[in-house]
Image (cartoon, helix red, strand yellow):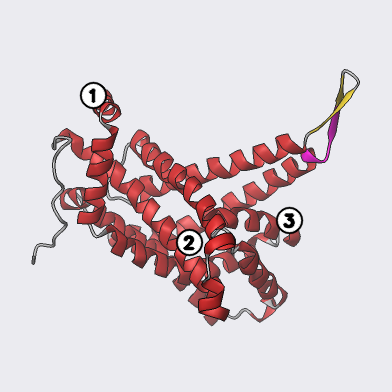
Amino acid sequence: MQIVSRHAIQVLKHPGAFALRTLKGFRANQGLLLAGAVAYYALLSIVPMLILTVIALSHFVEQAALLETLGRYLEWLIPGQSKAIVAELANFLVHRDVLGLVLLVSMLFFSSLAFTVLENAMSVIFHHRVVIKRRHFLISAAIPYVYILSLGLGLLLATLVAGSLQAMGQREVVFLWRTWSLGGLSGALLYLLGFAGEVFVLTSVYLVMPVGRLSLQHALLGALCAALLWELSRHVLVWYFTTLSQIGTVYGSLTTSIAVLLSLELAATLLLIGAQVISEYERLTTDPLDHTPEPFSTDAA
């Protein structure tokens, strides 16, 4: 506890130096290249994963409410493009009876790709852990599917809670001869629910993906950094796409795919930066704050 406190004080005294060290470590680990790989496979994975999740949950929750909740939280991940994806999901649900075994296996395969690539990216950032302890390949193979199941249960819970909050927002409270609408409170609670869910998912990623047991405090530190950076970035993305971007003129019918890929690239970059924050914080036990990170290299190199 004293070590953690000493490191925390050190970072609080020199936040700029720690941020610079984190960015240098991210660059040394080829972070942008890793983020590009994660974003590409996430683009391949997100639609099959959402199709599987929506088909499964539509047996327990009203389809319209489920798609509305999914659209609201997709807006956090791919700002400005969630309506197009939800529309495609709705079209697929209409024809879900034609879903065969081959298509089901294909969707399961593609929906796991992003998690596999993300685990490999985490191995690069936390290479000091991989050298000490490696994960059994069966555990790595099971992680994506356990995560898909967990995300599906989380979406089910979010749909139920969001429905309750929306119902509350339509009510009014009479107090001291004045009528107070609960719509503003409902909207604020929905936003806090989304942000808390974002932090929870990021924390779980940082706890599960790196090899070895990670401290909950460290995972929460990285999750808060990534979530706050993403909150700022997604508002900038929405403003950019609606005011300055000429992406529709340049890419035409591919606009949605390119916009989604750009959003996923930025999200993956911030996700890996959060991981780099944790990695650098861990290595404060052995390296001074002004230590220059060494580029990642394999044994062959």
Residue 174 vertical placement versus 24 (above, below)? above
* Amino acid of disc 3: Ala
* CA distance separating discs 1 and 3: 48 Å
Instruction: Of the two numbered discs 1 and 3 on the same chain, state the one appearing first in sequence.
Output: 1
Residue 126 spot, x, y in % from top left: 24, 50
Residue at the location (63% across, 47% down)?
158
Residue 40 in sight in this render = yes
Residue 60 in sight in this render = no
User: Which quadrant is the N terminus positioned in?
Assistant: top left
Residue at which label 3 appears: 65
User: Which quadrant is the C terminus positioned in?
Assistant: bottom left
Q: Which one is closest to the eye, mark 3 or mark 2?
A: 2
Residue 67 vertical placement versus 11 (above, below)? below
Residue at the location (56% across, 74% down)?
248
Range of the magenta residues? 169-173
Residue at which label 2 appears: 263
Residue 229 spot, x, y in % from top left: 43, 45
Is 80 colored magenta in this rendering?
A: no
* CA distance separating discs 3 and 2: 25 Å
Residue at which label 1 appears: 6
